[in-house]
Amino acid sequence: MFSLAKENIRIAFDSIKSQLLRTILTVLIIAIGIMALVGILSGVSALENTISSNFSSMGSNTFNFQRYEFTAQRQSSRERQKINPIIDYRDVKDFEDNYNFPFTNVAVSFYGTSTAEVKYENKKTDPEVAVLGANEYYIENSGLEIEFGRSLNVFDIENSNSVCVIGSDLQKALFPVENPVGKTISIRGSKFKVIGVLKEKGATFGNNQDLRVIMPIQKARSIYTNANINYSLSVKVDKTDMLEAAQDDAILIFRNIRGLNPIEKNDFGIERSDDLLNQVAQQTLALYIAAWIISIITIFGSTIALMNIMLVSVSERTREIGVRKALGAKSKTIAFQFFMETVIIGQLGGILGITLGILIGWGVSSKFDLEFATPWFAMFCAVAIAFLVAIISGLFPAIKASKLDPIESLRYE
């Protein structure tokens, strides 16, 4: 029995080799469908991994005040879009002074510029360094970690010390072989002593998070005096079970700072990191569904193409089938041979599609600085779908071949 199956598989391979061009085209048709599935799913997965890791770095017990909500609500054409005022320094300072909820840390920060040029002795960077002014809680609340040196402390903030913490890429650019801690850099003519270096974070959507300088907020305000600077507030709650109460109290205090009466809507946005992750999950779910729909339509076309080609193969090899039956081959043996041809072609298409899909996903991830992960689930689905396509496409042609009359087949020209 095993030797017969082995012989049928060999005949199936010989038949595939004898019709090489047709086999290649069939494999490509199947591969395109599998490639669409694996490529789109791996790309969406990379996007989800990147966004999730960025938001989760804030911690599930952190919430942030910002000018607008993370998602803008659709408004009717008659409704005028509401423009929220910026969160200015007076707002954040009043919040710091009045918010005293237990087990919380309030981080205040603002972007001075994203195009700073940083100098050290005879070296200088391109004008692409971000400069942030922040208080002592910013680094912790943002999920950043110190590689070596130390972070900003309360004395640095209260005394407006000329110190700073730099990103890992900035350290590599200015101090490739030296320890930067204790060295003095220059920004806009002001001198700053480097006290720490951040752990590498990587880039997100082309935004390099390791090319930045964090300095005491008052020091940054003395250098960057632009009008209408928008500040950021981040509150971290040490006890997760107190998060809801801490957030409600924070909203009440900030509404009072804004001078809102009880019936007015918030003129600011507030977001929690876990809320952002849920919104990201909803968006990526829609992308996953779209990927499956596109792939199923493509694979359905592949199934029809493979079945059609196998039916043509049965018709062309009618005389061969008649000879084999006349020599004693059973119907199930003939059916198994054609079925194996279909399965082999389907699996070749699946392997090629998986390879191309992974390459596409990896290419998209590299292009947009996303966190690529091997799409094991998509690969498993691709293998299963390729096998299913082969079964569906090969079953009818195999049955048709097995039912051919040997006498009529021998007469076939």
Image (spheres, rainbow, N blue to C red):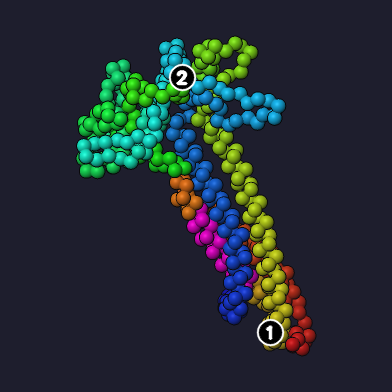
The residue tagged with tag 2: helix, strand or loop? loop
Magenta residues, dominant SS class = helix
What residue type is disc 2 on? Asp
Q: Left or right: where does residue 47 sit relative to residue 313?
A: left
In this view of the protein, can residue 150 be seen by the observer?
A: no
The residue at 51%/27% (across/down) is 272
Q: Is residue 316 above or below residue 216?
A: below
The residue at 65%/71% (across/down) is 339
Residue 210 drawn at (x, y percent)? 36, 38
| Location of residue 215 by image quarter | top left
Decide which of 50, 113 is in the foreground and name it.
Answer: 113
Looking at the image, tell me whether mark 1 or mark 2 is earlier in sequence order.
2
**Highlighted range, magenta:** 341-361
Kindly identify which residue carries mark 2. Answer: 88
The residue at 52%/24% (across/down) is 67
The residue tagged with tag 1: helix, strand or loop? helix
Kindly identify which residue carries mark 1. Answer: 320
Look at the image and tell me in which quarter the N terminus lies: bottom right
Q: Is residue 276 above or below residue 248?
A: below
Residue 211 drawn at (x, y percent)? 35, 38
Residue 344 part of the magenta segment: yes
Decide which of 311, 192 is in the foreground and name it.
Answer: 192
Residue 392 drawn at (x, y percent)? 69, 64
